[in-house]
Image (spheres, rainbow, N blue to C red):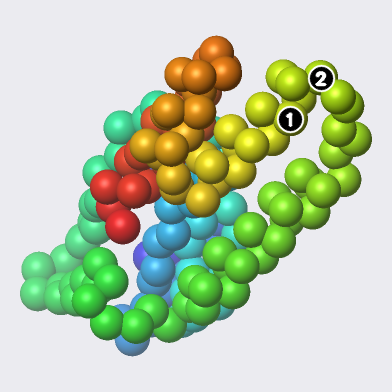
Amino acid sequence: NVGNIFHGHGIGSQYSNTSGANDTIGCGVDFVENKIFFTQNGKFLGIAFHSIINSDMYPMIGLKEPGQIVETNFGSSNYLYDIQSYTHSTRTHLMDHLISQELTTENDDVNTVINNYLLYEGCLDTARAFQSKTGIANDVLSEGLRERKLLL
């Protein structure tokens, strides 16, 4: 691999350094922030795709030469990349953002914060009931988190 990423067509754009026969490439899908990132040998390479909500996604590995071998890990063993740290960082960032928001006495503002917290934590059934009782629109984010729940 020459380090390119492909956005649904055959022309790639530069993303990282090249990878070789003994490298481990990881792919992370962040349904909370709607982005995809890659890792190489346990090191974060950066965000590759943004705004993935409502996108059809299929895992794919491309091989060029006969005899090439690929081993996959969909969670059956530990990842080289520290996904717990990434998750913790994302959660901390979201909580810092929520805490920094000025709350008013308007119920809609408080209800939105509660709704977003329930969605973030993956409490989809509770969020759905809360949305029904408060009249909050079923946000696009809940669809992405429903998919996240199915994957977990």
**Residue 91 horizontal/vertical position (percent):** 64, 58
68 and 120: which one is in front? 120
Q: How far apart are marks 2 and 1 (CA)?
A: 7 Å
**Residue 19 horizontal/vertical position (percent):** 42, 74
17 and 139: which one is in front? 139
93 up-or-down from 112: above or below: below
What residue is at 51 percent from the left and 56 percent from the top? 37
How crowded pointer 1 is (Cα within 10 Å; few <14, some 14-19, many 20+) is rated as few
Q: In which quarter of the image is residue 117?
A: top right
- Amino acid type, mark 1: Val
- Residue 106 badge: 2
Count of marks placed on residues: 2
105 up-or-down from 101: above or below: above
User: In this image, 97 relative to 19: left or right?
Assistant: right
Q: Mark 1 points at which residue?
A: 110
135 up-or-down from 111: above or below: above
Q: Do the residues labelled 2 and 1 touch (CB within 8 Å)?
A: yes
Asked if residue 115 shows in the view, the reply is yes
How crowded pointer 2 is (Cα within 10 Å; few <14, some 14-19, many 20+) is rated as few
Pick out the residue farthest to the bottom: 22
120 and 82: which one is in front? 120
User: In this image, 24 relative to 58: left or right?
Assistant: right
What residue is at 30 percent from the left and 32 percent from the top? 56
- Amino acid type, mark 2: Glu
What residue is at 54 percent from the left and 42 percent from the top? 118
